[in-house]
Image: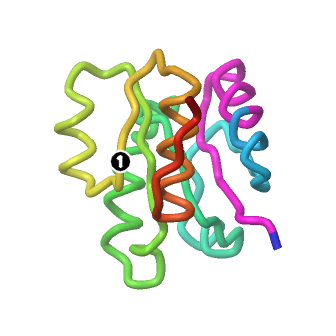
Amino acid sequence: MKKRVLILEDDQDTAYILGFLTRQLNLEVITSNKALFIPDIKRLSPDLIISDHLLGIELGGNLCKTLKSKESTREIPVLLISGAVDLPKIARECEADDYVAKPFESNEILDKIWELIYKKKFSFA
């Protein structure tokens, strides 16, 4: 069974690019243009969540913090993405497993997805 990635991104172009890149790793991709409720995330059972920090009126960092505070979801890795200048601080405070600043390089995001899904390094050089 393929590993599943949930992409939470309100910018359609960025969501498309993230989905395209993620599929290159032979992963199943589910996308949403808004933050989801915890029961919906549990039902989808993702192996990784890639979340924009600014999801319309929602904050991906707040969702991440909630996920990490619940026993049933704390083990799901969260990759936070954003153009926010203080992204490292936001990621640390919400306990994200990693972060990528926008605009991102394809190899950088692929490498981080691979590491978070399979817990090992992969070189795309």
Q: Which amino acid does the dot numbered 1 rest on?
A: Asp
Which residue is at 73% across, 37% downward? 19
- Residue 83 appears left or right of 50: left
Which of the image's four quarters has the C terminus? Answer: top right
Which residue is at 47% across, 64% downward? 119
Q: Residue furthest toward the front?
A: 125
Which of the image's four quarters has the N terminus? Answer: bottom right
Q: Which type of secondary structure does the marked residue at label 1 adopt? A: strand
Q: In which quarter of the image is residue 64?
A: bottom left
Please state the extent of the stretch shown in magenta in the rendering. Answer: 2-20
* Magenta-drawn stretch contains 10: yes
Q: In which quarter of the image is residue 32?
A: top right
**Residue 73 percent coordinates (x, y):** 46, 75
Which residue is at 22% across, 35% downward? 88
- Residue 70 appears left or right of 52: left
Q: Residue furthest toward the bottom?
A: 71
**Residue 122 percent coordinates (x, y):** 53, 48
In this figure, which residue is indicated by the disc labeled 1?
98
**Residue 17 percent coordinates (x, y):** 70, 25
Q: Is residue 78 above or below residue 51?
A: below
* Magenta-drawn stretch contains 108: no
- Residue 103 appears left or right of 33: left
Which residue is at 72% across, 47% downward? 25
Q: In this view, does 62 lie above or below 48?
A: above
- Graded by Cα atoms within 10 Å as few (under 14), some (14 to 19) or many (20 or more), the crowding at tag 1 reads some
Q: Quadrant of residue 78?
A: bottom left
